[in-house]
Amino acid sequence: MNSIDETILQLLAADARRALADIGAHVGLSPSAVNERIRRLVARGVIRRFTVEVDPAALNRAILAFVWATLAETGDEAKLHAQASQDPRVIECHHVTGEWRYLLKVRVESLAALEDFMTELKAAGQVGRSHAVVAMSSPVADAYVPPLG
Amino acid sequence: MNSIDETILQLLAADARRALADIGAHVGLSPSAVNERIRRLVARGVIRRFTVEVDPAALNRAILAFVWATLAETGDEAKLHAQASQDPRVIECHHVTGEWRYLLKVRVESLAALEDFMTELKAAGQVGRSHAVVAMSSPVADAYVPPLG
DNA sequence: TCTGAAATCTCCCGCGT
DNA sequence: ACGCGGGAGATTTCAGA
């Protein structure tokens, strides 16, 4: 894991379809050497997957919201985790420090859909109190590049 | 933007290196037709980019935190945006509704580094009050697939 | 959107450092 | 361990319809 690997990661993060020869020209290696490094990065789990970044608006997910939640008195953490991971509206679910136990990042079509989500969340019985914060704009949407710093 | 495109997006999101012929077999199209659809998805901005998902721990970014902040009395929104977008520790920055004006998603090496970040954030002068919440675990780390629902 | 050919790329192997 | 070069095989990409 040296600076060559970091440069390769940056180049792939910016455009994962770059040719090995092209990457090699940037880092001073042959295509096969670059290929071997990428293979090892995948094998070690440094690269989790090759993927595409999709515009949420194109998928009818224009509304981004963060939902704070506490576990209900009778709530089951495992059930909440299962519920969150199966709900396509839940992009992230974190168990956090502080007054609120959980923070969920959700993407929905509209504010009405957010209301439905909140209602369903409570109805499922694992969550106690909850509270949604809506993102109006996102100056930094997703800093994808792993910078050298 | 029909169900074929959605299937293509799902397949690419799960593995962006899948061969066009392989995708074609799933959606009932020839490789060149799949290629043409992907090209259009990119041209329309539905696919923002082809990228890799990197393990934060491998990059010395084991700590994930959410930082809530208000704008300082004398704070400048544009300056805060610029600061956030240039700081490699800031993964996301959202302008949100509610008591707190901003929500930042931050990745740092350690809790000490988080403390440094908070100090620097305030020292820059754009932020008034701020408050960090640390993620202890993430039952749903990143739901990458755009599901049909 | 398909077929088919051409250009390009990836991937694997042996060899050298 | 790491990298290089060659070549086979697969893949993308372009034409024409």
Image (spheres, coloured by chain):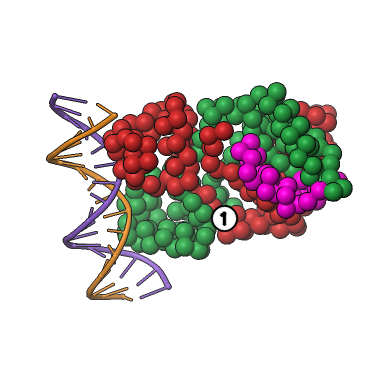
Chain colours: A green, B red, C orange, D purple
Q: In the figure, is residue A132 to the left or right of B29?
A: right
What residue is shown at x 61% (from left), y 35% (from top)? A141
Please say whether residue A90 is one of the residues in the magenta stretch: yes
Q: Quadrant of residue B70?
A: top right
Question: Which residues are drawn in magenta?
Answer: A75-102
Q: Work out whether residue A80 or residue C6 is closer to the camera in this orientation and state it.
A: A80
Q: Quadrant of residue B43?
A: top left
Please say whether residue B119 is one of the residues in the magenta stretch: no
Q: Quadrant of residue A126?
A: top right
Q: Work out whether residue A138 or residue A124 is closer to the camera in this orientation and state it.
A: A124
- The answer to whether residue A18 is seen in the rendering is no
Q: At which x and y percent is residue A80?
A: 73, 47
Tell me which amino acid carries mark 1. Asp
Q: Work out whether residue B45 or residue A119 is closer to the camera in this orientation and state it.
A: A119
Number of marks in the rendered image? 1
Q: At which x and y percent is residue D13?
A: 26, 36
Q: In the figure, is residue B36 to the left or right of B53?
A: left
Examine the rendered structure and indicate whether residue A99 appears above or below residue B49: below
Q: In the figure, is residue B53 to the left or right of A131?
A: left
What residue is shown at x 43% (from left), y 45% (from top)? B16
Placement of the N terminus of chain B among the 4 image quadrants: top left
Report helix, strand or loop for mark 1: loop
> What residue does disc 1 label?
B55
Placement of the C terminus of chain B among the 4 image quadrants: top right
What residue is shown at x 38% (from left), y 62% (from top)? A36
Q: At which x and y percent is residue B54?
A: 54, 52
Examine the rendered structure and indicate whether residue A51 appears above or below residue B74: below
What residue is shown at x 57% (from left), y 55% (from top)? B55
